[in-house]
Amino acid sequence: MRQIRSKIYSWLRKSEQYTQTDNVYLAKGGFWLVLNRAVAIAGSFLSAVAFANLLDPALFGNYKYIISLVGFLSIFSLKGFGAALTQAVSRGIEGGFYSLSKTRLRFACLQSLGVIALGGYYLYQSNFLLALPLFFISFILPFRSEFSLITNFLTGRKNFRLSAKYQSIQNLITNFSLIVFLLSAVFFPAKTKLIVFSLVGIYFLSETIVNGFFYIRIKKQLQPNRREDPKTKKYGYHLTIVDFLDQVAQYLDQILIFQQVGAIRLAIYTFALWPVDKLKEPIQMIATLALPKFSVKNSSELKKNLLPKIFKLLILTGAVIVFYCLIAPFIFKIFFPRYTEAIIYSRIYAISLLGIGYLLSSAALNSQMAIKKIYFLEIPAGILSILLLIAGWWWLGILGIILAKTISEIIRSVISIIMIKKL
């Protein structure tokens, strides 16, 4: 076994002259991340099939709307702290595991207050279908926010095996619980409030409990050191501010669709995006692997090696887009027969895959703590995304939103590449 492994590593080392990448590191870490993503995609796919075939589209639309409202308010959970922690831990500075978690817990209470306010609004409107789940999850959100940092810590440590193990278990438990409930929900179809309340509760509660369990185990077993870099928290605040507009753009489309044309149209829109978003995950995985490596390189090295890789990636992405557009009708007709109307939207949205260069460029900028360049990238791109979404919705409805998301993602990728050139 050792001889086989040695030969594989030797071959990977030789191949580095063509890829200009640490292929051994990519293979070691990539194996666990691929395993984790395979489990996550399988679980997500099965739950998506269950939602598409076992749940009324109107109920699914309400479920997605609640998740969108919570996501819209997640700016208060200091999401930028995650990338800041990864960057610090990759340099051996792990005190943020304690300090950032506490700060994030306190700020997430603001998210909970926002969710309670929304619940109160819908209660005033006598919309118990939305009000009751919002009240319930408001008590869970601070702990969910605090415990979610475990993934960022393990990524910084380059402990992809343990990260994959924990995330896979969490994904399996959440998706299995949702599928089991959906299978049982067919026996009480009239209980719409109970169905939506239970789905939202399962989604948030299962994730929080599992992550909380692993958070405590990591704290005891790995015992993160208490070295602090005062720049880490400040950098996390910067990333959170930068992320604000992106958060608005990420959830504004779903809120607009629900408010203007209802839950069923939101369900169709959700399934149009789902397959394409899953195709982006391999690049997200590579960006996750790359961030710790990028953090110990200087800017000139990154600029020299990263741009050719992005160009090669775009060529491959073009082939993926063509292939997906050919097979999309079969995917929907077989697995999501209620949502065949989403095929045309999904095919158009597939073009947004050309914007995946942003994922690697963003990881490189974060690794160098190039906060000014991150601002120059994210603020204009975020404003443009929001303006395009509103304009697209105004003129063309859902089709306009799809076009707006596609165009804005490509533009964001172009700006990110320009920022890498200026490192």
Image (cartoon, helix red, strand yellow):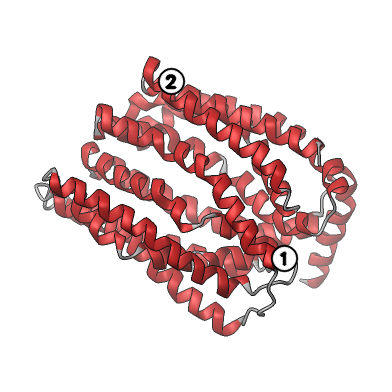
- What separation in Å lies between label 1 and label 2 (alpha carbons)? 41 Å
Residue in the picture at 53% in, 53% down: 38
Marked residue nearer the N-terminal end (1 or 2): 1
Q: Residue 407 location, x and y as percent?
A: 56, 24
Does residue 283 lie above or below 10 as drawn?
above
Near-viewer residue (167 or 65) = 65
Name the residue that disc number 2 marks. Answer: 392
Q: Amino acid at mark 1?
A: Ser
Q: Residue 57 location, x and y as percent?
A: 24, 37
Near-viewer residue (213 or 330) = 213
Rendered image quadrant of residue 24: bottom right
Q: Secondary structure at mark 1?
A: loop
Q: Secondary structure at mark 2?
A: helix
Q: Amino acid at mark 2?
A: Gly
Q: Residue 7 location, x and y as percent?
A: 85, 62
The crowding category of the residue bearing disc 2, from other C-alpha atoms within 10 Å (few below 14, some 14 to 19, many at least 20), is some
Return the residue found at the far bottom: 220
> Could one spot residue 332 in this view of the protein?
yes
Residue in the picture at 49% in, 24% down: 388
Does residue 99 lie above or below 129 as drawn?
below
Q: Is residue 329 left or right of residue 132?
A: right
Q: Is residue 38 left or right of residue 333?
A: right
Name the residue that disc number 1 marks. Answer: 90
Does residue 242 lie above or below 334 as drawn?
below
Q: Quadrant of the N terminus?
A: bottom right
Q: Residue 257 location, x and y as percent?
A: 32, 30
Q: Quadrant of the C terminus?
A: top right
Q: Which numbered marker is on residue 304?
A: none
Q: Is residue 87 left or right of residue 246?
A: right
Rendered image quadrant of residue 2: bottom right
